[in-house]
Image: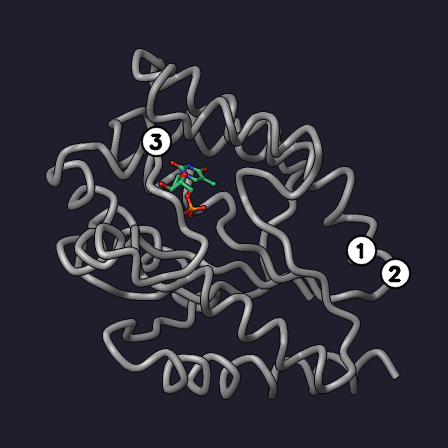
């Protein structure tokens, strides 16, 4: 089973994906936690280029898009497909929806072109389930500035103007509206432990039924 986590800046996604990972490990599931951009040596090199706040401020939106997709292509081939093939569970901190939301709705690149590029980069692999942490951009960015969430460094996209973050937020709403079955929408303006519980309540029955079906 392939589960992705999505949300705007400071929605607490990375904190939650780690908590869910720990819970699934404790329940003896074969689970792997990864993230985008990154998750492989090559992907981590791309991550540095694409999120650099100092050197790469002139990056073109199309170049940015292709870098995110290159990182994803590597992750799918090197990590995600092999793990799924041996029956493992993948938890991925961001995936293709981030590209549609940020590069598509945020930067205004054509959505239909992006969908084709995503299809190519992922070789047609999409998550079974996506957890969307819903938080208004102002709240998320304020959290990020305060450094509320451990391990999340300020990046080049955080630096975009507030209108960009609103477009990304609206973009996610459109993506969800077109694919309601796949998404679990979670109110991210709650205590982290309460959020983890909501997510686990959504994931556990799905995992149990998948495990039962493969017996
Ligand atoms: P994060 O690790 O804190 O989520 O940061 C990753 C940043 O990269 C975040 O600002 C969202 C952005 N991003 C895109 O713009 N497009 C993508 O396809 C991905 C995966 C991330």
Query: Residue 11, percent across and down?
Result: 31, 61
Q: Residue at x 41, y 25 (%)?
A: 52
Q: Residues within 10 Å of mark 2 (few under 14, many from 20)?
A: few
Query: Residue 31, percent across and down?
Result: 73, 68
Residue marked by disc 2: 86
In depth, the one of 121 and 111 nearer the eye is 121
> Is the CB atom of the residue marked by disc 3 within 8 angstroms of ligand 1's nearest atom?
yes
In the picture shown, does residue 1 fall above or below 98? below
Q: Residue at x 58, y 55 (%)?
A: 92
Residue marked by disc 3: 103
In the displayed structure image, the side of residue 149 where residue 72 appears, left or right: right
Query: Residue 117, percent across and down?
Result: 52, 27
- Element class at badge 2: loop
Q: Residues within 10 Å of mark 3 (few under 14, many from 20)?
A: many
Earlier residue among tags 2 and 3: 2
Whereabouts is ligand 1, in terms of quadrant? top left
Find the distance from the CA under tag 2 to the CA under tag 3.
Answer: 33 Å
In depth, the one of 30 and 109 nearer the eye is 30
Residue marked by disc 1: 83
Find the distance from the CA under tag 1 to the CA under tag 3.
Answer: 28 Å
In contact (CB < 8 Å): disc 1 and disc 2 = yes
Q: Residue at x 38, y 15 (%)?
A: 55
In the picture shown, does residue 83 fall above or below 205? above
Query: Residue 132, percent across and down?
Result: 38, 64
């Amino acid at each position: 089973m392939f589960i992705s986590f999505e949300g705007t800046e400071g929605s607490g996604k990375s904190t939650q994906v780690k908590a869910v990972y720990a819970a699934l490990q404790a329940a003896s599931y074969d689970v792997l936690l990864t993230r985008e951009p990154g998750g492989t040596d090559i992907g981590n090199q791309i991550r540095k280029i694409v999120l650099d706040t100092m050197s790469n401020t002139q990056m073109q939106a199309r170049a940015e898009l292709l870098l995110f997709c290159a990182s994803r292509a590597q992750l799918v081939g090197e990590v995600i497909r092999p793990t799924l093939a041996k029956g493992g569970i993948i938890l991925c901190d961001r995936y293709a929806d981030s590209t549609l939301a940020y590069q598509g709705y945020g930067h205004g690149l054509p959505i239909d072109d992006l969908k084709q590029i995503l299809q190519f980069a992922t070789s047609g692999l999409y998550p079974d389930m996506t957890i969307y942490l819903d938080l208004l951009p102002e709240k998320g960015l304020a959290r990020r500035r305060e450094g509320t969430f451990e391990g999340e460094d300020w990046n080049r996209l955080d630096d975009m103007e507030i209108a960009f973050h609103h477009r990304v937020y609206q973009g996610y709403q459109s993506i969800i509206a077109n694919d309601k079955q796949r998404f679990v929408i979670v109110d991210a303006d709650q205590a982290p432990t309460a959020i983890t519980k909501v997510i686990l309540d959504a994931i556990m029955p799905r995992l149990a039924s998948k495990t039962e079906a493969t017996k």
